[in-house]
Image (tube, rainbow, N blue to C red):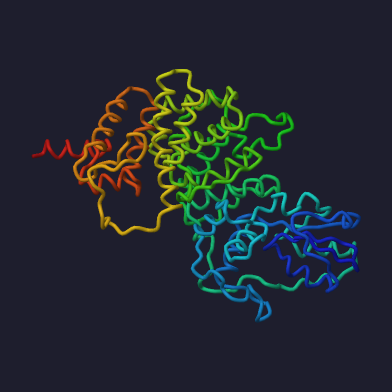
């Protein structure tokens, strides 16, 4: 948030949790702003400055302000009271990664305000690249003193709106290895561009063993080497032409992707669209929290192919993942992405059998989607089990009759045929089969009618089958 102090002819680029309130308190009450997300043109004639801070310390400061409240604030100040007293580090990271929560204060809520305070300093919204002078929080007294000598203002900096000293404050000891992994990724640009060493930051995590920290660093280095564009190693590289493929090389060793897990826990689907592919990939990642990284990579390849079906590198990478590790990917995707895999196979596969399998999955999933969408549109909530059952058969259209729930075998026969077809030894068959299994486990028309009929489908997950066979051997 940017402020103009016309009496001093200076613009202050206020990055949250970087002593901004303290600085503004000594620069006078004659102030214009805030201007969010950009510096107005008529302000650009004046020098500007900003304060930067080590990312993990800034993150903890922001979390603690919302968790325990802030000191040295008026009694009516929003931040004087704990706004989110049960907030923990993992929850704060979930909010940062949740694409449905804005960071620009476009809505008013505690979660959106927290995200605004924790948002990366180097993000374009914060206008840091427009600052003529950069001050470091860690050396703020000296840096601010030098700046003040140039613009002629008081150099005494009070502490305003700093997090309250409380036994409930979170510290570096509360950051887990999983949290640190997520923090490193979220603040990758802050570490890189602002010159803060992430390994120095990690040394503050004394509760993590040296072996654990080394494992994390090694894993991140391997991922960065395999997918440099995504992990921010080459995002600003001048030798990368505009529009270069944002995916890793289609010939990359996939082992690092299917042996590592996306940090965090799986979050709700993000249904937006970012113009930048890299930004889009990052927004999708929280959906795959706790799941294999290869599933997120597959989703990213699908995004590229949706925008450019002729992208040969994306196509090659997609089919390599499909053919080399279909079991891992299918287990680590929800039905939304299982359907997207089937869509893509139906659209671009060279093999007719694969296209047919892909279409089977797409038809199955979208039949449920359309049926359940219409039900939510037109029908009120219904008691379960239903109070009234239809008769043996009622006409729907053109000779098609309703399923005879009480005695019909249509569901059983349909699933039997599907299971037989999916015995085909093709990777795409795993995705269709997984879609059917998920549909039978969820609140769908297939599951509900099967439940009323008192019949189970022929399908059984392989781990269940193995357990049953093992138990039978012991009898």
**Position of residue 296 measured from the top left corner of the image (x, y, whole percent):** 50, 38
Q: Which residue: 30% across, 45% down?
A: 447
- Residue farthest toward the top in the current orientation of the protein: 351
- For this view, does 63 lie left or right of residue 424? right
- Residue 419 screen position, x and y as percent: 28, 30
Question: Is 289 above or below relative to 61?
Answer: above
Residue at point 78% right, 69% down?
A: 24
**Residue 468 placement: quadrant:** top left
Determine whether, in the image, residue 43 is placed left or right of residue 261. right
Q: Indicate whether 254 appears above or below 72.
A: above
Residue found at x 35% / y 36%: 434
Q: Residue furthest left?
A: 475
Question: In terms of depth relative to the viewer, which is nearer, 352 or 3?
Answer: 352
Picture layout, residue 284 above or below residue 77: above
Question: Is residue 202 in view?
Answer: no
Taking depth in this image into account, of 64 and 402 the one nearest to the observer is 402
Instruction: State the image coordinates of residue 18 (x, y, percent, origin top left).
Output: 70, 62
Left or right: where does residue 311 sit relative to residue 294? Answer: right
Is residue 7 among what the camera can see? Answer: yes
**Number of labelled discs?**
0
Q: Which quadrant would residue 436 be assigned to in this image?
A: top left
Q: Which is nearer the eye, 18 or 85?
A: 85
Work out which quarter of the rendered image holds the C terminus and state it.
Answer: top left
Q: Residue at x 35, y 46 (%)?
A: 444
């Amino acid at each position: 948030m940017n402020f103009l102090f016309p009496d001093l002819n200076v613009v202050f680029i206020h990055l949250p949790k970087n002593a901004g309130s303290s600085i503004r308190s000594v620069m006078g009450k004659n102030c214009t702003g805030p201007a969010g997300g950009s510096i107005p043109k008529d302000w650009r004639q004046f020098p500007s400055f900003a304060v930067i801070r080590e990312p993990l310390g800034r993150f903890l400061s922001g979390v603690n302000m919302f968790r325990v409240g802030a000191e040295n604030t008026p009694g009516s100040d929003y931040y004087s009271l704990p706004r989110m007293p049960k907030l923990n580090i993992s929850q704060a990271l979930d909010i940062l990664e949740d694409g449905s929560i804005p960071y620009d204060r476009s809505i008013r809520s505690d979660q959106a305000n927290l995200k605004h305070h924790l948002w990366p300093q180097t993000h374009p919204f914060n206008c840091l690249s427009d600052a003529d002078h950069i001050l470091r929080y860690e050396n703020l007294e000296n840096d601010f003193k030098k700046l003040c000598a140039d613009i002629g203002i008081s150099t005494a900096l009070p502490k305003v709106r700093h997090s309250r000293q409380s036994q409930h404050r979170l510290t570096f000891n509360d950051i887990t290895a999983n949290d640190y992994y997520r923090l490193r990724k979220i603040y990758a640009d802050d570490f890189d561009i602002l010159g803060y060493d992430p390994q120095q930051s990690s040394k503050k995590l004394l509760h993590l063993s040296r072996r654990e920290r080394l494992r994390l660093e090694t894993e991140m280095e391997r991922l960065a080497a395999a997918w440099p564009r995504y992990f921010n190693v080459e995002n600003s590289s001048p030798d990368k032409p505009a529009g270069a493929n944002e995916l890793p090389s289609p010939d990359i060793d996939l082992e690092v992707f299917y042996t590592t897990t996306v940090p965090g826990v799986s979050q709700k689907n993000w249904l937006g669209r970012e113009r930048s592919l890299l930004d889009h990939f990052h927004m999708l990642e929280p959906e795959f929290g706790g799941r294999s990284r290869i599933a997120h990579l597959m989703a990213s390849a699908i995004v590229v192919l949706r925008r450019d079906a002729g992208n040969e590198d994306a196509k090659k990478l997609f089919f390599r993942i499909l053919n080399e590790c279909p079991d891992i990917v299918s287990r680590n995707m929800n039905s939304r992405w299982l359907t997207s895999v089937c869509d893509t196979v139906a659209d671009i596969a060279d093999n007719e059998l694969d296209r047919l399998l892909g279409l089977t999955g797409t038809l199955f999933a979208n039949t449920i989607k359309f049926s359940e969408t219409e039900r939510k549109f037109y029908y009120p909530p219904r008691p379960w089990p239903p109070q009234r059952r239809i008769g043996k058969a009622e006409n729907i259209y053109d000779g098609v009759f309703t399923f005879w729930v009480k005695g019909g075998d249509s569901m059983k026969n349909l699933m039997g045929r599907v299971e037989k077809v999916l015995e085909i030894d093709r990777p795409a068959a795993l995705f269709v089969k997984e879609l059917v299994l998920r549909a039978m486990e969820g609140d769908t028309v297939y599951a509900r009618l099967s439940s009323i009929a008192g019949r189970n489908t022929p399908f059984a997950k392989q781990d269940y089958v193995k357990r049953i066979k093992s138990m039978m051997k012991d009898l």
